[in-house]
Amino acid sequence: MPDRLVHIVDDVPELEDAPALTMVVVLDGFLDAGNASGRAAQHLVDLSDGRVVATFDVDELHDYRARRPPMSFVRDHYASYDAPRLVVRLLGDAGGTPYLLLHGPEPDTRWEGFCHAVREVVERFGVTRVVGMGSVPMAVPHTRPIAITHHANRPELLTGESPWRGELRIPSSAQALLEVRLGEWGHDALGFVAHVPHYLAQMDYPRAAAALLEQVELGGRLTIDLSGLRAEAEDTEAEVARYLDANPEVAEVVEALERQYDAFERAEESGSSLLAQEQRIPTGEELGKEFERFLAGLDGPEPSGDGPAEGEG
């Protein structure tokens, strides 16, 4: 078929007798604050570097001019090209249970066609549930637990309560549309979105990646070794703590977020209001100025007590 968007391996004996099969979905480019979902997907691949069992036609789905893939130029010639890949891998969890991982750049075009192609994968391999991961920047402090938004195309699939009330109008994504379409086609799909402190959204934040995979264990009925990722998260938290100790003006902004967060929690527990009555929220300009310096310091060679030098911007 000339318009086929996915090419699936015919012979996958590992899945022939599987009573249940989970497919984890992570699409890069939109829902990935702190590179949390991308880092989580890479952790799964590092634990079990399985073979590719389905490949999507990226040329039909990717806008190369909007997201130009990197390539190397060495002295006088082009040496390599990192072509974007959107694939499904067959992996195994810590107990040997097989599962699939669909990972790669979010399609820029043909979302409906992409959903139909994923449906073909689901039905060819007998996937019983699809589990998505994502992360969004939120005005929350890194010193509090990672909040998770749970969602599913059937209420029975939810593993936790959503923190939201009522209807929210949000930008759509191919991953969100996939969950809707799978529900319409009678396939179970659920997912988790981690709330990443917005001032850490531009750096790798493995703590959020670990929090997502903890939810995937529950929702996908898998067992995942998170020890390495948690150690990485501890190192990152220590780095952030050192920077805050050396830069009290930034620490003050984080403390303001802590007060706001705690006020929200108390109000929610009392059933009164989610809005704090006497807590001042830092303005966007204040947060922007402080955390531009914050991120510049973390990206630089070594933070100092005088704060990061003003960079190239």
Image (cartoon, helix red, strand yellow):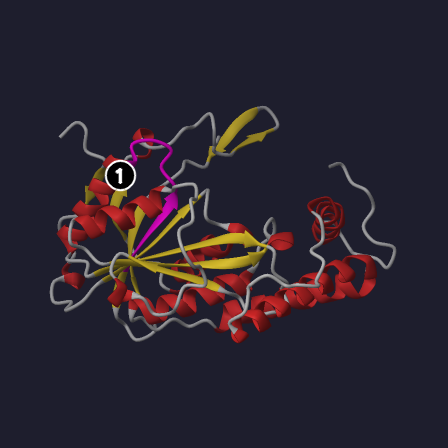
Question: Residue at the location (18% across, 67% down)?
Answer: 20
Question: Residue at the location (53% across, 75% down)?
Answer: 269
The quarter of the rendered structure image containing the C terminus is top right
Residue 141, above or below 269: above
- Give the residue at the far front of this rendering: 272
**Residue 235 pos. (x, y %):** 63, 67
The answer to whether residue 93 is visible is: no
**Residue 216 pos. (x, y %):** 36, 66
The quarter of the rendered structure image containing the N terminus is top left
**How dense is the environment of label 1, judged by Cα within 10 Å: few (below 14), some, or many (20 and up)?**
many
Question: Residue at the location (37% across, 32% down)?
Answer: 62
Query: 50 and 18: which one is in front?
Result: 18
Q: Which residue is mark 1?
A: 114
Residue numbers of the magenta segment: 100-111
Q: Look at the numbered disc 1 and give the secondary structure of its residue.
A: helix
Residue 154, above or below 55: below
**Along the horizontal axis of the image, is 269 left or right of 4?**
right
The answer to whether residue 205 is visible is: yes
**Amino acid, disc 1:** Phe
**Along the horizontal axis of the image, is 15 left or right of 108?**
left
Question: Is residue 108 inside the magenta stretch?
Answer: yes
